[in-house]
Image: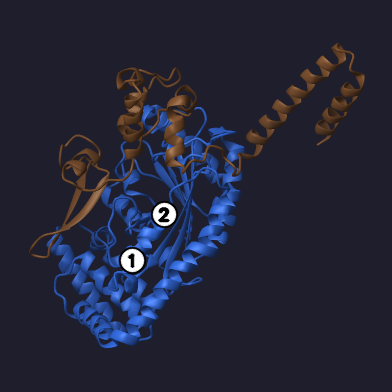
């Protein structure tokens, strides 16, 4: 639905005004037009405030906005304007810029403690650990630390049995 | 199953049953997920959206949880049909209005809906009447597991499930409980509840979610933070602490109303009944406003013409899109108002 104010942006704020006659009127506005009319819009304001802090620190909006994601070609400026990222890789591409935004949005939390995707998540964790162990084993053997190597080998065979 | 089939059944959230249903209308749990190898909506091309719709649609339909579900593609459908889905709380207004390939997988009993290509590639949500969060999680979490075997979700060990907006990061979980709080509203104590909710980082919204105001004293309470706590923790806080507390406040406010202002309370309830029985033109907002008073009357035992299920059956057919769909043609506000009033007068005289 197109905003009834500017006729351009997507309307995301939906209101029901009551006319003096008591008749309700539905209105659909974009966040910009809603803000101009003094309608309180809480969503997505966090990026603006965090950006202001960056500017205060002398980093400048221009250089921030120019940061581009190599994966999807979107820019940090676009995220600032829309409140939405371009692709999953943005979280890596803008890691430092997003850190304070995420902390603010998530009440200071930085670490996921919930569930993970079943096969892919578990599989990749297991693979990563196995790679680590094989590397440690090679190092232990190379350094002639046979006791340590034996322990690592046991752990590897235990994991491979699972 | 298509939209015409939905029209003739009672939506899950309007069953009027389930724990604490004197105050809790319905419970909803939503998980946001994205495919690892596709751009989010702002950067997705038309063909990306098409592929996401096909991939997710196929994956969903092959899940055991979805064995009685149907995929409804929304691109190219009539606006009125999409509006029907919005009114039934099966899709968001955002999905209804968005351009391009998109759809929703809906289970037969309307307890499950998977929106495809909304703000995130997938938004799977479970719906139940009354407070039934654990049951819901018991349905949604296995569906999520099953889907994750068919498609690769964007996931990061540190940040959890990656979402288009950082406010959904981590669990991607939004628990949302719809409450009927007429006594707290009437005594203006709702302001205190809202303040307490804000301190707990909870959002209070109107009947149709984000950006809507509370019509007919129906409020949605939902969590705003999604990272740092496990799904079970978030759900348990809602189910055992937050919601029971609000229910307790509302019940206490109702008792106080009955004790101190019973005449005014009865006057409101019976005037509401009178308006619904006599109106010749009535808006959906005014209808909900009166139905809210009747619901309060039923819950407090001061109105006995019909029960809450019969009352709930008046809500959906009087919504704008349902009314027009039922009437078979597009109607302007005045015609809708006339039709609505006619429907209510007929129903209420049957129920008398």
Residue at left offset 49%, top offset 66%: B131
Could one spot residue B130 in this view of the protein?
no
Chain bearing tag 1 is B
Q: Percent x, y for residue B151?
A: 56, 35
Shade of chain B as shown in the rendered figure: blue
Q: The brown chain is which one?
A: A
Where, by quadrant of the figure, is residue B279 drawn?
bottom left
The disc placed on residue B190 is 1
As helix, strand or loop, the secondary structure at mark 1 comes to helix
Left or right: B318, with B60 as reference point? left
Labels 2 and 1: the sequence-earlier one: 1
Which of A71/B300 is in front? Answer: B300
The relative height of residue B200 versus residue A29 in the rendered view (above or below) is below
**Viewport quadrant of the N terminus of chain B:** bottom left
Residue at left offset 40%, top offset 30%: A85
Q: Percent x, y for residue B46?
A: 36, 29
As helix, strand or loop, the secondary structure at mark 2 comes to helix
> Mark 2 or mark 1, which is nearer to you?
2
The disc placed on residue B199 is 2
Q: Marks 2 and 1: CB-CB under 8 Å? A: no
Which of B118/A84 is in front? Answer: A84
How many other residues sit within 10 Å of disc 1, few (<14), some (14-19) or many (≥20)? some
Residue at left offset 68%, top offset 31%: A125
Chain bearing tag 2 is B
Distance (Cα) linking label 2 and label 1: 14 Å
Q: Percent x, y for residue B318?
A: 26, 66
Left or right: B191, with B114 as reference point? left
The relative height of residue B254 versus residue B36 in the rendered view (above or below) is below
**Viewport quadrant of the C terminus of chain B:** bottom left
Could one spot residue B332 in this view of the protein?
yes
Which of B239/B92 is in front? Answer: B239
Q: Percent x, y for residue B262?
A: 29, 87
């Amino acid at each position: 639905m197109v905003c009834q104010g500017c006729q351009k942006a997507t309307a995301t704020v939906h209101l029901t005004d009551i006319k003096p006659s008591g008749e309700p009127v539905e209105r659909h506005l974009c966040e910009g037009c809603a803000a101009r009319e003094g309608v309180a819009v809480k969503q997505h304001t966090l990026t603006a405030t965090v950006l202001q802090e960056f500017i205060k620190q002398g980093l400048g909006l221009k250089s921030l906005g120019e940061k581009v994601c190599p994966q999807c070609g979107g820019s940090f400026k676009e995220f600032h304007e829309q409140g939405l990222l371009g692709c999953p890789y943005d979280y890596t591409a803008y890691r430092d810029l997003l850190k304070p935004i995420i902390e603010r949005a998530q009440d200071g939390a930085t670490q996921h403690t919930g569930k993970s995707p079943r096969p892919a998540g578990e599989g990749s964790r297991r693979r990563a650990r196995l790679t680590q162990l094989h590397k440690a084993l090679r190092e232990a053997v190379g350094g002639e630390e046979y006791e340590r190597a034996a322990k690592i080998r046991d752990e590897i065979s235990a994991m491979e049995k699972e | 199953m298509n939209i015409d089939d939905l029209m003739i059944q009672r939506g899950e959230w309007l069953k009027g049953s389930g724990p604490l249903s004197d105050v809790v209308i319905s419970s909803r749990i939503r998980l946001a997920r994205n495919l690892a190898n596709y751009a989010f909506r702002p950067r997705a091309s038309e063909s990306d959206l098409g592929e996401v719709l096909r991939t997710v649609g196929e994956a969903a339909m092959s899940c055991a949880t979805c064995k009685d579900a149907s995929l409804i593609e929304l691109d190219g459908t009539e606006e009125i049909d999409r509006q029907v889905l919005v009114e039934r709380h099966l899709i968001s207004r955002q999905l209804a209005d968005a351009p391009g390939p998109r759809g929703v997988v809906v289970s037969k009993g309307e307890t499950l809906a998977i929106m495809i290509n909304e703000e995130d590639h997938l938004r799977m949500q479970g719906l139940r009447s009354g407070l039934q969060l654990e049951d819901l999680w018991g349905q949604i979490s296995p569906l999520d597991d099953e889907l994750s075997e068919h498609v690769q979700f964007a996931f990061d060990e540190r940040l959890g499930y990656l979402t288009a907006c950082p406010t959904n990061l981590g669990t991607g979980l939004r628990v949302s409980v719809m409450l009927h709080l007429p006594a707290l509203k009437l005594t203006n104590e709702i302001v205190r509840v809202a303040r307490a909710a804000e301190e707990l980082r909870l959002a209070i919204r109107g009947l149709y979610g984000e950006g809507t105001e509370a019509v007919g004293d129906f409020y949605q309470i939902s969590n705003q933070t999604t990272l740092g706590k496990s799904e079970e923790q978030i759900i348990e806080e809602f189910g055992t602490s937050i919601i029971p507390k609000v229910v307790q406040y509302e019940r206490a406010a109702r008792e106080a109303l009955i004790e101190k202002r019973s005449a005014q309370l009865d006057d409101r309830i019976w005037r509401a009944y009178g308006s619904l029985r006599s109106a010749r033109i009535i808006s959906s907002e005014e209808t909900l406003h009166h139905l809210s008073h009747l619901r309060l009357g039923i819950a407090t035992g001061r109105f006995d013409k019909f029960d809450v299920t019969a009352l709930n059956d008046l809500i959906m057919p009087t919504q704008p899109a349902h009314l027009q769909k039922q009437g078979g043609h597009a109607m302007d506000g005045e015609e809708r108002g006339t039709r609505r009033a006619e429907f209510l007068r007929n129903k209420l005289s049957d129920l008398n």
